[in-house]
Structures are given as structure tokens and as C-alpha cells.
């Protein structure tokens, strides 16, 4: 892979735009950050940039969701991890932010507010167009270089990823390099059969990636749980109520096509856990009532999936199997992660929620690679080109010329 690292750019005393991904799980009730794994991971890059003026930028959550919050808590957490002050400004590209950036001194760290508070950061662009957005145009002249370290956002062609890097000398941060090295080592040594375990609540990216994973021989089996399992249940006419996801009909149709094309690949839960009278109750799919909210997979499914996991050569898991934060509904996520931890195959676990789960169950060190990345990693393993990596490659070519 042809990309530059911090040492390749002459950054002494310069002002650097550092795009990280410290998008963190948030407690829906309290609005507080549930863990700070991604913040700890990017601290290495911030620390290694102590000889420059660092402007750190990240998104958090998605517009309209409970996790779409400002980054003041992140600034405090980063400050605690670094053991030094991290300034925070409740602005992204307005006069307040520009003044703070212009006044930064060598060694100082400033965190901008949630990038997705800027409308343009919620859209995808070609690099030339991203460079012309108001967001990038208002800020880029204040910077000498750009460091891309947002590996979990590598699949988004947002202005902060492809815009600044189009105009400024750009290199990869420590986390990007660490992830790419680990994934490269694992994927070159990987052996079949390949099993992909998909859960959680993000559906669109995963549906897109499944076909690529299967056709690149990276998924002999796909074990489904969470919201994505419901999409496939709907495609198989097992449930017929609205799931509340955007482009639902289109996504269900995609799942129907995949099921018809690869009938041997997909495994759907035989049983699920719902809440009745405040208790976990395991029922088969046929007993499911439209008022039931599914919170986990059932015991039969955990056993069946665990057997497949333990007989696989390479296992990749993204997204929890249930709402493991809810008491009584952790069995699925714990069971599948334990099956991975005790497997002789190569194991990769991805995403913030599963990192929290691994820590809670005390088995993180038994997994070969725990990635900070969710959807981006699925697409990477599926062999898709990622805008952040392409931006790094273009910059390396420009700087070397
Ligand atoms: C993630 O957590 O997967 C990344 O931060 C990307 O978030 P997004 O799917 O909302 O773009």
C-alpha cells in the first residue's frame, strides 16, 4: 500500500487538520459516552503530533438520532487520556473556530465540534467537489497538512475525508497504519471456511457488502442476527411488519435476491428472545407477535451458530447479536463472542459495541484482531475501494512527484 505517514511530511511547528473517528456509543437514557476505546486509540497519533498545532475533528452519531451530540465529553476524555489540556470549541468552521485555530500554539490541541453539525459533512462527494464545499473552503487555508486517522469512516466520501486531503499534503495517522498492517497480515494468512457473523442495527452498508464478501470467497457462511436478520425474515415472508429503516422496500428486495442466489450461505435465527412481563422469553420465529420487540437470539440459535463458528478457519463478527446492554439479553452476543474466543480459527471482531462487549465478558485478548471499525471494515474485507485509502494513495503520489 502506497501511503505516507507522519514522518514523511515535514510538519515541525505546522498546523495540522487531524481527522479521527471518535464516534462513540452513547447511553440513550443519560446521553453519556459508554466507553472511550476509539478516543484511546487515536490518542497515540495526537501524542505523536506534539511538535505541531493539532486541530482534531470527528463526527458523532447520525442526524436525528440520540447519539447526535456535541463533542465536549470527547474533549474531556481525550484530555484525560493524554494527560494534557484539549481545548474544545462549539463551532466547526465559523469565526469562533477560525480564530481559535489561527491562535493555536505549538503543542496545543483543539477539538472542533461534531462535524455532522455541518450539512455538507452528511453528503458524499468526488474529491474535487468536496474541496469546493463551504466547510473545506472556509478552513483549509489555516492548515499546512492533513492527517487522516479515521479508519472507521474510511468508507465515507465526506468533505473532511476527501476534501481537505485533495488540497493539502496528507498522510495516514497511527491508527490507520496499525489497522491496515494487522488486516493485511490476517487476510494474507487467512484460511477457509470463512464465516461472517452480522448483527447490530446498521443495515444498509452491510447489505451492500454481503454480496461482495460472498463473491470474493470471503463468506462461505453468513450468520445473521439483529436488525439485519429481521430484514432477511421479511424477505423470506416470515414477518410482515415495518422495520422502520430507510429504503426498507429496496433493502428487503436486495435481501430476497441474495437469499435466492445463495440459499446455502445464509443462516437465520431459529429462535429469538423477546421481553414479556419484564422477562426474557425465548420463542420460535413462528410464535412471534407483531408487538414483540426482539432483543436477542435464542439458545438454539446460539448453539447452532457457535458450532459453525468453531468449525471455521476465519471468522469475522460485526455488530452485536442482541441488545446486550439490557439485562437478560446478553446471552447471544456473549455466546457468539465466546465461541470465537475458543475457536482455533483466525478471529476478527469489529466495531465499538462489540469492543465494549468483549471487555465486559473479559475475553478481548482471545481475539486475533479487534478493530475500531464497523461498516468500513466489512467493506474493506469485501475488497471494496475505500475513499479514505484512495485519498491517502493520491496524496502519496502527489507528494512523491
Ligand atoms: C462507525 O461507527 O461505523 C463510523 O463512525 C461511521 O459512522 P456512520 O456509519 O454513521 O457513517
Image: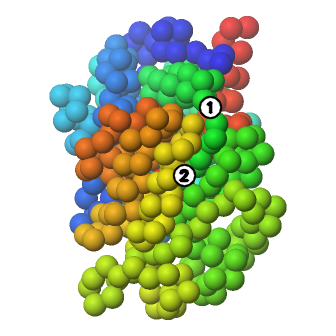
Q: Name the residue rendered at 59%, 67% in the picture.
A: 268
Q: Are there few (<14), some (14-19), or many (20+) residues within 10 Å of tag 1?
A: some
Residue 311 picture quarter: top right
Q: CA distance from mark 2 to mark 1?
A: 15 Å
Left or right position of 215 against 334: right
Could you tell me which secondary element the residue under label 1 belongs to?
loop
Of the 4 image quadrants, the one containing the N terminus is top right
Identify the coloring.
Answer: rainbow
Q: Name the residue rendered at 70%, 77% in the picture.
A: 236
Residue closer to the observer: 99 or 158 = 158
Q: Name the residue rendered at 43%, 58% in the picture.
A: 320
Where is residue 273? Give x, y as percent. 40, 76
Where is residue 185? Give x, y as percent. 56, 22
Q: Note whether 55 is above or below 342 in the view shown.
A: above
Q: Name the residue rendered at 66%, 12% in the picture.
A: 399
Circle 2 is placed at which residue position? 308
Residue closer to the observer: 115 or 150 = 150
Residue closer to the observer: 158 or 296 = 296
Could you tell me which secondary element the residue under label 2 belongs to?
helix
Where is residue 125? Give x, y as percent. 70, 46
Left or right position of 213 against 215: left
Q: Are there few (<14), some (14-19), or many (20+) residues within 10 Å of tag 2?
A: some
User: How many badges with numbers are in the image?
Assistant: 2
Q: Note whether 361 is above or below 32 in the view shown.
A: above
Of the 4 image quadrants, the one containing the C terminus is top right
- Residue 266 shows in the view: yes
Amino acid at each position: 500500500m502506497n501511503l505516507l505517514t507522519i514522518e514523511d511530511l515535514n510538519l515541525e511547528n505546522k498546523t495540522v487538520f487531524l481527522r479521527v473517528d471518535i464516534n462513540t456509543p452513547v447511553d440513550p437514557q443519560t446521553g453519556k459516552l459508554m466507553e472511550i476505546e476509539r478516543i484511546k486509540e487515536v490518542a497515540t497519533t495526537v501524542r505523536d503530533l506534539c511538535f505541531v498545532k493539532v486541530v482534531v475533528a470527528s463526527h458523532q452519531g447520525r442526524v436525528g438520532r440520540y447519539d447526535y451530540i456535541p463533542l465536549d465529553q470527547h474533549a474531556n476524555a481525550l484530555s484525560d487520556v493524554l494527560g494534557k489540556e484539549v481545548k474544545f470549541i462549539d463551532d466547526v468552521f465559523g469565526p469562533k473556530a477560525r480564530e481559535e485555530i489561527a491562535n493555536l500554539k505549538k503543542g496545543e490541541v483543539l477539538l472542533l465540534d461534531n462535524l455532522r453539525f455541518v450539512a455538507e459533512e452528511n453528503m458524499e462527494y468526488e474529491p474535487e467537489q468536496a474541496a469546493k464545499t463551504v466547510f473545506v473552503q472556509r478552513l483549509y487555508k489555516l492548515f499546512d497538512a492533513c492527517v487522516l486517522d479515521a479508519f472507521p469512516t474510511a468508507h465515507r466520501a465526506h468533505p473532511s475525508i476527501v476534501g481537505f486531503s485533495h488540497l493539502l499534503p496528507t498522510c495516514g495517522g497511527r491508527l490507520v497504519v496499525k489497522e491496515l498492517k494487522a488486516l493485511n497480515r490476517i487476510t494474507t494468512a487467512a484460511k477457509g471456511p470463512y464465516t461472517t457473523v452480522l448483527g447490530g442495527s446498521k443495515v444498509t452498508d452491510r447489505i451492500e457488502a454481503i454480496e461482495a464478501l460472498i463473491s470474493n470467497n470471503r463468506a462461505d457462511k453468513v450468520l445473521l442476527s439483529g436488525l439485519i436478520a429481521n430484514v432477511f425474515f421479511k424477505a423470506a415472508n416470515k414477518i410482515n411488519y415495518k422495520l422502520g429503516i430507510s429504503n426498507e422496500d429496496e433493502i428487503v428486495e436486495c435481501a430476497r435476491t441474495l437469499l435466492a442466489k445463495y440459499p446455502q450461505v445464509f443462516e437465520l435465527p431459529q429462535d429469538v428472545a423477546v421481553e414479556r412481563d419484564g422477562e426474557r422469553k425465548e420463542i420460535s420465529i413462528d410464535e412471534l407477535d407483531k408487538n414483540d420487540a426482539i432483543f436477542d437470539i435464542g439458545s438454539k440459535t446460539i448453539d447452532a451458530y457457535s458450532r459453525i463458528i468453531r468449525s471455521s478457519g476465519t471468522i469475522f463478527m460485526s455488530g452485536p447479536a442482541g441488545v446486550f446492554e439490557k439485562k437478560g439479553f446478553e446471552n447471544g452476543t456473549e455466546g457468539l463472542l465466546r465461541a470465537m474466543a475458543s475457536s482455533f480459527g483466525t478471529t476478527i471482531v469489529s466495531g465499538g459495541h462489540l469492543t465494549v462487549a468483549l471487555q465486559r465478558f473479559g475475553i478481548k485478548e482471545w481475539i486475533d484482531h479487534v478493530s475500531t471499525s464497523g461498516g468500513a471494515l466489512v467493506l474493506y474485507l469485501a475488497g471494496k475501494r475505500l475513499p479514505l485509502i484512495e485519498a491517502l494513495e493520491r496524496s502519496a503520489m502527489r507528494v512523491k512527484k
